[in-house]
Image (spheres, helix red, strand yellow):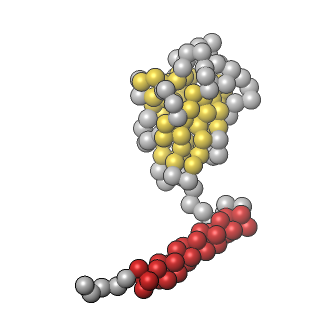
Amino acid sequence: MGGLGWQQIAPAAIHYILILIMALAVYRLYRVMLGGQGVVRPVASLAWKIGDQPHSRQLTGNVTIGRGPQNFIVIDDEAVSFEHAVIAEYPDGFMVSDLQSTNGTLINGQKLLGPRMLKKGDRITVGNTVLTFRAGR
């Protein structure tokens, strides 16, 4: 029975695992030192209309949608809760969550039951307003 035994493979495997751990530590240190600069971030925006007037906002970080003036996107609609929904930025995209709003949040016409990653073209409905998620460069 030829081949390598565990005693011969283990040192090489441990060596490669240590290299991966060190690379991850350097990457995290790089992000902290540069404050996240130089790291590719997803680019996205929301577009919606109020009456005939189009609106658009680029998304950065975590943003809230609601009727209250402290929200990133303020929608003056009695069917929208004071703080209705939040869109959170992650390295691989944006996730939307309902903030226990009275009337709920819809994604493409379906009630949002938990956090969900957004895809290009998704329609987010809060109250009587439909916001379209735009992603890409």
Q: Of all residues shown, which one is farthest toward the front?
A: 1
User: Relative to residue 104, is residue 116 depicted above or below?
Assistant: below
Front residue of 59/87: it is 87
x, y (%) of residue 131? Answer: 51, 30
Q: Give the image quarter of residue 75.
A: top right
- Residue 106 relative to residue 85: left or right: left
Q: Give the image quarter of residue 110.
A: top left
Identify the residue at horizontal 69%, vertical 30% (top origin).
Answer: 71
Front residue of 55/92: it is 92
How many callouts does the rendering have? Answer: 0
- Residue 75 relative to residue 134: left or right: right
Q: In this view of the protein, can residue 56 be seen by the observer? A: no
User: Relative to residue 43, is residue 127 depicted above or below?
Assistant: above
User: Relative to residue 11, is residue 131 depicted above or below?
Assistant: above
Q: Of all residues shown, which one is farthest toward the top?
A: 78
x, y (%) of residue 88? Answer: 60, 41
x, y (%) of residue 5? Answer: 37, 82
Where does the N terminus fall, quadrant-wise?
bottom left
User: Relative to residue 113, is residue 22 depicted above or below?
Assistant: below
Q: Give the image quarter of residue 122.
A: top left
Identify the residue at horizontal 48%, vertical 26% (top origin).
Answer: 112
- Residue 29 relative to residue 87: left or right: right
Identify the residue at horizontal 47%, vertical 50% (top origin).
Answer: 136
Identify the residue at horizontal 41%, vertical 28% (top origin).
Answer: 108
Q: In this view of the protein, can residue 45 be seen by the observer? A: yes
x, y (%) of residue 85? Answer: 60, 29
